[in-house]
Image (cartoon, rainbow, N blue to C red):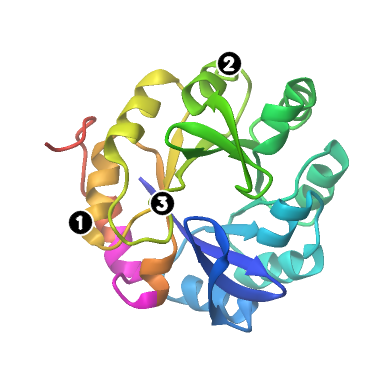
Amino acid sequence: MELWPAIDLRDGRCVRLRQGDYAQETVFSDDPVAMAEHFVAAGARRLHIVDLDGAKDGRPSQAGLVARIVRAAAVPCQLGGGIRSLGTARAYLDAGVTRVVVGSVAIENPERFVQMAETFPGRIVLGLDARDGKIAVRGWLETTETTALAVARRNAALPLAAIVYTDIATDGMLAGPNLPALVEMVGAVPLPVVASGGVANADDVRRVAATGCAGCIVGRALYDGGLTIPAAIAAASEATSSAAPA
């Protein structure tokens, strides 16, 4: 299972939110480029970057910073936040981002999402951010009546790179991932599923791997010291079972 250390950007700084709440922000670094270099030096083979300002405002607001992070890291990077058009996706891909995570467009403009997936095969990731199983959009500020499973199934035949499934209730809480939801998502679609939310330690990484997820995004635990990059990578490589432990 792939490990994706997370770098969440807001106002040019590296931050983490609790349950996606912009009012519950913790700043971990004023230098996100240095943080990316630190993760890579510790052994990270890829990075997950989120433009929180872009996610909320619906347009890229930290493209220059993202480009600097990608150049400095020199490992595959996926980026989410504010990617609502073909032009924005193309600009980020041209800037060196390996793949882009698109969420709100898949709900609000399904035709455009299909166009994006077909224009950039293997480079678009479907971002599914769920609150009680229902999709949240626009930086998690609005919750819809559409379920994450329904959106995943609707787009399962597209040439997507993966699905990133985030359980908002667990994100940033260090209380453990929503394993039943991950098992359900993995079983619902043939696409690789990348889990996000709740990972606090190496045991949580093993539990995510045991669900059959292809990847796991880890954020706050790496910043708070509950998990190191080497320990997370080792844990991600251990589990081979396709079902979550009881």
Is 149 placed above or below 6 here? above
Q: Which mark is residue 154?
A: 2
Viewer-closest of 64 and 84: 84
Mark 2, Cα crowd under 10 Å, few <14 / some 14-19 / many 20+, is few
Viewer-closest of 43 and 174: 174
Viewer-closest of 11 and 63: 11
Q: Residue 203 carries which label?
A: 1
- Specify whether 194 is left or right of 35: left
Q: What element carries label 2?
A: helix
Disc 1 residue type? Asp
User: Disc 1 or 2, which lies upstream in sequence?
Assistant: 2
Q: What element carries label 3?
A: loop
Q: Which mark is residue 229?
A: none
Which residues fall within the magenta stretch?
Answer: 224-233
Main SS of the magenta segment?
helix
User: Disc 3 or 2, which lies upstream in sequence?
Assistant: 2
Viewer-closest of 156 and 111: 111
Residue at 60% across, 59% down: 49
Disc 2 residue type? Arg
> Is residue 194 covered in magenta?
no
Instruction: Quickly name the residue at label 3.
Output: 197
Disc 3 residue type? Gly
